[in-house]
Image: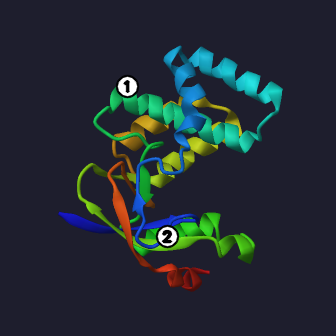
């Protein structure tokens, strides 16, 4: 069965086929996954080292650390679910997309916003999972604000276990190929 979803991108073009990890960002969380494989203390040492080196901004370190922890929990406790870092993300309704857009893009300069496109995509309804993005955001906040990997582990288990918050923002995750079939970027002008 073919389903229709929505996907935003700065590089995708109409008719393009989305492949898992087409932006090749999974490599960014690999050091954190490796550290988790050696235990939580190993992860804490890696974080201390990254902070001492100051080669990256803390925002990026926190993001990829959270992704690494989530990937480790997924691999070890939820292996039937595809990798977050090697999946693409979609929305099954434009209201959830509007929430994401307002939180992350609406304040950007016009030049940056003009690069973003919104597409209706089609894909086979295989290996499609729906999770509350708010649980992931909570994990990021715990890491960013408190450097608390233990709380991130709890959030990862809740996320993959299907927990949702009082006001969930649903993201659809899949590692299956999809095709951009309709450019609906005009919708972006209606949510500012």
Residue 172, located in which quarter of the rendered image?
Answer: bottom left
- Going by the image, does 181 lie left or right of 110? left
Residue located farthest toward the left when viewing the structure as drawn: 1
Is 144 situated above or below 103?
above
Residue 150 visible somewhere in the drawing: yes
Image quadrant holding the N terminus, namely bottom left
Report how far apart the C-alphas of labels 2 and 1 lie in the structure: 36 Å
Image quadrant holding the C terminus, namely bottom right
Tag 2's secondary structure? Answer: loop
Residue 86, disc: none
Which residue is painted at 45% across and 68% down in the image?
Answer: 96
Of 157 and 175, nearer the camera is 175
Residue 108, located in which quarter of the rendered image?
Answer: bottom right
Residue 168 visible somewhere in the drawing: no
Q: Tell me which numbered mark, 2 or 1, is placed earlier along the sequence.
A: 2
- Going by the image, does 65 lie left or right of 169? right
**Residue pointed to by mark 2:** 13
**Residue pointed to by mark 1:** 76
Which residue is painted at 55% across and 46% down in the image?
Answer: 138
Q: Position of residue 28 (x, y in %)?
A: 60, 37
């Amino acid at each position: 069965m073919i389903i229709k979803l929505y996907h935003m991108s700065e590089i995708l073009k109409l008719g393009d086929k989305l492949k898992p990890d087409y932006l090749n960002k999974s490599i960014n969380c690999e050091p954190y996954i490796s550290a988790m494989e050696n235990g939580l203390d190993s992860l804490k040492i890696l974080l201390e080292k990254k902070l001492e080196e100051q080669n990256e901004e803390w925002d990026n370190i926190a993001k990829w650390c959270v992704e690494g922890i989530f990937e480790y929990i997924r691999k070890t406790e939820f292996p039937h679910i595809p990798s977050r870092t090697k999946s693409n993300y979609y929305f099954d309704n434009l209201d959830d997309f509007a929430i994401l857009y307002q939180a992350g893009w609406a304040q950007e300069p016009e030049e940056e916003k003009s690069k973003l496109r919104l597409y209706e995509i089609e894909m086979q309804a295989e290996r499609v999972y729906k999770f509350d993005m708010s649980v992931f955001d909570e994990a990021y906040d715990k890491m960013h604000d408190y450097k608390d990997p233990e709380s991130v582990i709890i959030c990862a288990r809740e996320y993959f276990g299907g927990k949702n918050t009082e006001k969930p923002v649903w993201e659809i995750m899949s590692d299956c190929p999809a095709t951009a079939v309709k450019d609906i970027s005009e919708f972006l002008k209606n949510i500012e």
